[in-house]
Amino acid sequence: MAGSTFGDLFRITTFGESHGKAIGVIVDGCPAGLDLSEAIIQPYLDRRRPGVQSYTTARKESDTAKILSGVFEGKSTGTPIAIILENEDQRSRDYGNIAELFRPGHADLTFDSKYGFRDYRGGGRSSGRETAARVAGGAVALEFLKTLGIEVKAAVTMIGGVPAAEAEDVLAAAAARGDSLGGIIECRVTGMPAGVGETVFDKLDALLSQAIMSIGAVKGIEFGEGFGASRLSGSNNNDPMRMKDGQIEFLSHHAGGILGGMSSGDEIVFRAAFKPTPSISSVQQTVTRSGEDTDLVIKGRHDVCILPRAVVVVEAMTGLVLADLLLRNMTARVDNVKRFYQP
Amino acid sequence: MAGSTFGDLFRITTFGESHGKAIGVIVDGCPAGLDLSEAIIQPYLDRRRPGVQSYTTARKESDTAKILSGVFEGKSTGTPIAIILENEDQRSRDYGNIAELFRPGHADLTFDSKYGFRDYRGGGRSSGRETAARVAGGAVALEFLKTLGIEVKAAVTMIGGVPAAEAEDVLAAAAARGDSLGGIIECRVTGMPAGVGETVFDKLDALLSQAIMSIGAVKGIEFGEGFGASRLSGSNNNDPMRMKDGQIEFLSHHAGGILGGMSSGDEIVFRAAFKPTPSISSVQQTVTRSGEDTDLVIKGRHDVCILPRAVVVVEAMTGLVLADLLLRNMTARVDNVKRFYQP
Amino acid sequence: MAGSTFGDLFRITTFGESHGKAIGVIVDGCPAGLDLSEAIIQPYLDRRRPGVQSYTTARKESDTAKILSGVFEGKSTGTPIAIILENEDQRSRDYGNIAELFRPGHADLTFDSKYGFRDYRGGGRSSGRETAARVAGGAVALEFLKTLGIEVKAAVTMIGGVPAAEAEDVLAAAAARGDSLGGIIECRVTGMPAGVGETVFDKLDALLSQAIMSIGAVKGIEFGEGFGASRLSGSNNNDPMRMKDGQIEFLSHHAGGILGGMSSGDEIVFRAAFKPTPSISSVQQTVTRSGEDTDLVIKGRHDVCILPRAVVVVEAMTGLVLADLLLRNMTARVDNVKRFYQP
Amino acid sequence: MAGSTFGDLFRITTFGESHGKAIGVIVDGCPAGLDLSEAIIQPYLDRRRPGVQSYTTARKESDTAKILSGVFEGKSTGTPIAIILENEDQRSRDYGNIAELFRPGHADLTFDSKYGFRDYRGGGRSSGRETAARVAGGAVALEFLKTLGIEVKAAVTMIGGVPAAEAEDVLAAAAARGDSLGGIIECRVTGMPAGVGETVFDKLDALLSQAIMSIGAVKGIEFGEGFGASRLSGSNNNDPMRMKDGQIEFLSHHAGGILGGMSSGDEIVFRAAFKPTPSISSVQQTVTRSGEDTDLVIKGRHDVCILPRAVVVVEAMTGLVLADLLLRNMTARVDNVKRFYQP
C-alpha cells in the first residue's frame, strides 16, 4: 500500500532513487510466450535518456536495461520479469544546503512531512529518474499490445503555450534565462477492441487518469473533447453512429474512444498537461527544515523542458493500463470461460 | 477486479442497477467509534436526489438510506457498514426499442461488447443512479474527515461555458429545446495535514483523478493551475514559501495543495469537466444491435444539467480518497508505530 | 484492508452481525451469462440453516436469500450480485452480563482489544452466522464451477475423535452434559484442469488454506498426505506417473492433486480440523472487561457440533478459491490472449 | 495477480529463477527510520544457505545480499527496499532429459500445463532457491518486529516421524539410500499485543496459513491444539482466564494465541508439516512431455532434509504477516486516528 505497485493482472512494482545503486522494475503477470530481450526494451529507454534531446539535462546515464529473471530462451516465461538499470552517475558531489531546505515545486517539504527525513540526493525517489523504471516495465506492456495489433502513440503538441512545432524560440528564451517550460502531450491508441475497461471505479479513463497523473509533473488530463465538452450541449457532444462495411463508425469523436468507462472501438485520445519543471536558476524564496526563511539558488544544468523525454513515459503508463484491462476483460463472460477450458 | 471496489484501508464496494430492487454500498475499514446513523447520512443523499433542483430529472426516489450492519448504539464498530437504498421507481414501463439499439453517448454499445447483453432498464449499472451508493459511502468518509477538522467543499463554477451564477438563460434555452449542458465543478479541501498521499503510483492527485474520472460524465480533471500550468514558466509556476506565525505559508497556489503526490498543507484545489448528459430529445443517428442504421428518439423527461446533483458526488469521492490515504499515512514511520504499540 | 473482501477476479465482500438487520454478500466479477436465481441459491443456504440437523442450535432463521442486483432475466449480467438475508431472530433479549466479560474460546477479548468495544449480541460479527453470507457467495461460485464440470464435495469424516458414522454416542453424551465436540471435514474436488493456481504466494493450496482457516472454528488444514507426509520418505511420498488412455495417471495420491501450488489434474483432497464450539453449559473461569475474575455460565441452547452445518461452508470457500484461480489462469499465455482477441 | 506479491501495508514482491542472473525482493511499505544494512540482513540469509548444515545440498551460493534502494545513511527511508542476490552457480551444465519429462513431486507437469513451457534449469521459479528472496524480505520484517519487542522463533521438532533431536540415524539411513525425509517445524511468537488480525477473511491464522502453505514443501498447518482440538470437547479445549498482576492470564493454551482471528496476547504457536523433498536418487516412473512412459534417474547431490534450512523461511513468512497486520491494526479506531493527527 506504499503505492510502488501498479496494475492488477499485468502489474509493475518499481524501486529506486536518483542516486542509489540502481533503479528497476518487476513486471508480474506478463503472459508467457512474449518475445523479450534487452535489445527489445532498450530503444524505449533510449527515448527518455537524458542528454540526447535538446533542452534536456546533460546528466550522463546510459540507462542500460538488464533483465534478471522471467525470460528464457528469448520468451517471457509467465514468472516475474525483473529489469534493473544501474545508476552510473552516483559520483559524490556537493549537494550544498539542499538537505536543509525545501525547494519550491519539489517534493522536499512533503517527503519530510511524511517520513521525517529524506534521501535528498538528486530528488531521491521523487526524481524524474523514477520514470525510467516505468518505461522499462511499460516497454513489456507495449510489446505485448503490439502482438494484439494495438498501437500507443504520444507526441508533444504544445510547449509553453505555443504549438510544439513553433516552440524553438520560447525554448531558447527560457534556456537563456535559466527558466523552464511545461506543455501538453497528446496520446492516441489505435486497434483497441471494444468493451475493455470496467464499469464503475476501474473505468478505462479512470485508470488512465491515475496512471498519467502519477507522472510527477502532470497537473491535468482530459479525454476526447475533454474540458471543451463542458461547454458543448448534448446534441453537439454525442457521437452519432452509422454502419460502414459491417462495422460501427462514429460520425464524430468527442468521446475520445471511451463510453461508460469501456473502449468503444474508436481511437482513444487524451491529453496531459505538464507543469514546467521546478528546477530553475533564479533566486527563489523558501524556508529551511528548521523553520527559517531563506533564499535558494539551484546550481547545475537542468531540463528546460522535460516533455520530449516524457512522451515515452506517457506511452509506457498507457500501455500498462491497457494491458491490464485487456487481461481483466477476458473473464467477463461465462461462455468465453467455457470455451477456454472446454475447447 | 470487476472494479466495484474502491480504496484500500477505507474501502467501499457498491452494487445495484437503475431499476433493480436496490442499490447499496459496503464501507469496510471505517475506524470504530465514529458517530453514525441514518439521520447523519440522509442529508448527503438528499443533495443528489432527483426532482429537488431545477433542470434535473423528475424521477421520484426518496433515496432513503437504511444501515444494515456495522453500527451499534450510534457508533461504527469497525466491521463493514452496509447501506442500502431501495429502488422505489421500478414500475414496469415501456422501454421501447432501447434494448435493441445503442444510445449515442451512453454505455449501451460498450456494455454489449463486453458482456454480450445488458440490463437495459434505465441504463442499468451505468445509470447515474449508481452514484447514490457512492454518496452513501462517501458520507461516512466525510463524517470521519470532519472529526479530523478536514472539510471538503465542491461547487458548480461553470455551466455550458458560462459562469454558473449567470447560467439561467442557457439552461432555460437548453431545456426548451430538449437539450443538455455540461460544466465544471471545483472542489476545495481545507484542513489537510501535510504529507498525506503516496510517492509514486498512489499519489494523492493520481488517486483523486481515478476517483473523479470514474464518475460517469467526467471527461477531464486538473489540479491547481492545471492546464494553465502548461503555459507558465517554472519561475512563475513554482510557489515560493515563507514562515508566518511559525507555519509555512505559500505565497502563491499554483500547485493546488499537492507536491510530489502528497498534501503540502495548503488548500487542495481541483476542477472536473462534466460533459452534457447524453439523454436528449432530438433525433439521433445510431445503429441497432443487429447492425442496422436507425434513428433514435428518447422520450420522457431527463436532467438538463446534472451538475447540481453531482456536487455531492464529487465531495463523496474526494472524501473516500482522503480518508483512505490518511489511514495509509499513519504507518509511514517506525517511531509512530512504536509510540502506538508502546505508548 | 479490514478484510471483509476475499478473492481477486471472482471476489466476495460480506457484511453483517448476528443480531443486526441483515447479513449479506456482494459477488463481484462473476462472469456474465450464468443461470442464477434465488431458487438456485437457496438450497445451499438450507444446508447450513440452524435447527434442521440434530445436535445443532434451535435458532429459527429461514435464511431466505434475496438477490438485489446483478441478475437480469435469469442470468448474471457481469455486474455485482448483491444477496441479503434478513435476520428474523432479532428479538430483544436478556444478554445478561455478556457485554461485560470475555467468553473463553470466543472473540470477545480480542474484539475489545482491537476496537475498544463490540456489538455483543450473539457474538456480533464473529458469530457463526457470518458464514451464511459466505455460503450465498460461494453458491454462485459453485454454480459457475458446475458449468465447467468441476464438482466440490465435502463431508464430515470425524467427530470428537471417532469416525462420523459412529459418532451418535459421543454426540448424545456431549449433548447430555451441555458440552460440544469438534471434528474433521474432508473436501474433494473433481474435474479440475491442470495448471490452475499461481506459482509463489498465491498457490492453490495457500489460498485454500487462507479460505478454510478463515472459517471461525478451523484450527488446522492439510492437503493429500498432509501431516502424514512429514513421516514419509521421498521415495514413498512422490506420486509416480504413467500414461493411460492418452492421459497422465498418478499411481498414488499423496500430493492431494496439487504440485508446486498448481492443480495437477488429479483429484484435490484436503482436510480441515474444527475445534469444538466454545459455547458450552458448564461454569467457566474468565475475567471482566474491567479486569476482575468472574465465573461464566452461558444459558440457552447451542450447537453440540457445528460440523454438519459447516460442510457447505467448506464447499463454498473452496468454490470461491477455485473460481478465482480459474479466471486468473486464463491470462497465463500470450497465445491464448491472442486467440481471445483475434479469433 | 500472478501472485509474486505478498502483504498489503508491509508488502514484498519477489522475482528470480534458480539459474537466472539473480533473485531478489522489493519490500514496499516498511516504515521509515528502521536501522538497515546489508550486514543486518546477511545473517538471516546465512541460516538458509546451502552447504552449511549437514544433509543439505552442496550447491555453492554465498547468497550475498545487496541493497539497491530504500536505505539512506543506515535507515529505511519509507521508499521501496530492493535487495538482490546474484546467482553465482549458473554454470552451464548437462540438464539431461529433464526438460523433456516431468519429475514426480515437482512442479514440472503443472508449470507446463499452465504456461506451455518452463525454465527447466534447476526447477526454475519453483526451486527452493526462491525462498532466499522471502528470507531477505522477511529479515526486514523481523527487524521491524524486534523494535516492537516481538520475537519469532521457529525450530525443527520432528524429522521423518521421530523427534528432531533423535533423527541422526534416520537421516544417515536416508542419505545412504539417496532418499529424503520431511518433518515438522514449530513456530512461536512472543510479545504480540492483543487485537492484531482482521475479523473475517484476513484473520491472523488465515494469513499465516497462506504464508506458510505457500512455502513449496509444506502440506499442512495447525494452530495451538490444531488437529488435536478436533478430538477434544469444548470444556477441555476452551482456555479459562484469570487476572494475574493486572494482566489477563490464560490457564491453558489450546487456542495457540489467536481468538476470532486476532492475537489474544498469549504466545502464538503453530506447526507446519513438510513433505520430504522430491529429489531422490532412486528410479522413478514418470511420463514425458510428449506423453510417453519413461523412467527417471536424478543425478547430483540434493538435500536429504530441507527442514534445517527452512526454519528461517518459516520465521520470515511469519514476520511478514505479523508486520503487515500490525500496521493494518493501527487504523482500527477513530480515537487513535485523531490522536495521531491532532496530538
Image (tube, coloured by chain):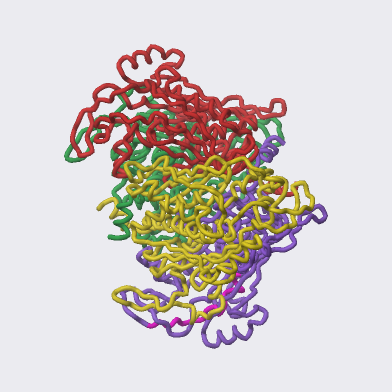
Chain colours: A red, B green, C purple, D yellow
Position of the C terminus of chain B, as image quadrant, is bottom left
Q: Where residue B275 sits in the image (x, y, percent)?
A: 48, 32
Answer with the quarter of the image where residue B151 lies. top left
Q: Say whether residue C299 is magenta.
A: yes
A112 vs C279, nearest the viewer:
A112
Q: Where residue B286 sits in the image (x, y, percent)?
A: 64, 31
Q: Where residue C256 sits in the image (x, y, percent)?
A: 66, 62
B232 vs A72, nearest the viewer:
A72
- Which residue is at 36% across, 46% downward? D76
Answer with the quarter of the image where residue D258 lies. bottom left
D334 vs D83, nearest the viewer:
D83
Q: Say whether residue D118 is magenta.
A: no
In-image side of B258 versus A76 (left or right): left
Residue B304 makes an appearance in the image:
no
B221 vs C8, nearest the viewer:
C8
Compared to D225, does D91 lie above or below? above
Compared to A30, does A132 lie above or below? above
Q: Where residue D196 sits in the image (x, y, percent)?
A: 41, 62
Residue A334 makes an appearance in the image:
yes
- Which residue is at 73% across, 53% downward? D296
The residue at the far left in this view is B245
Magenta stretch bounds: C295-310
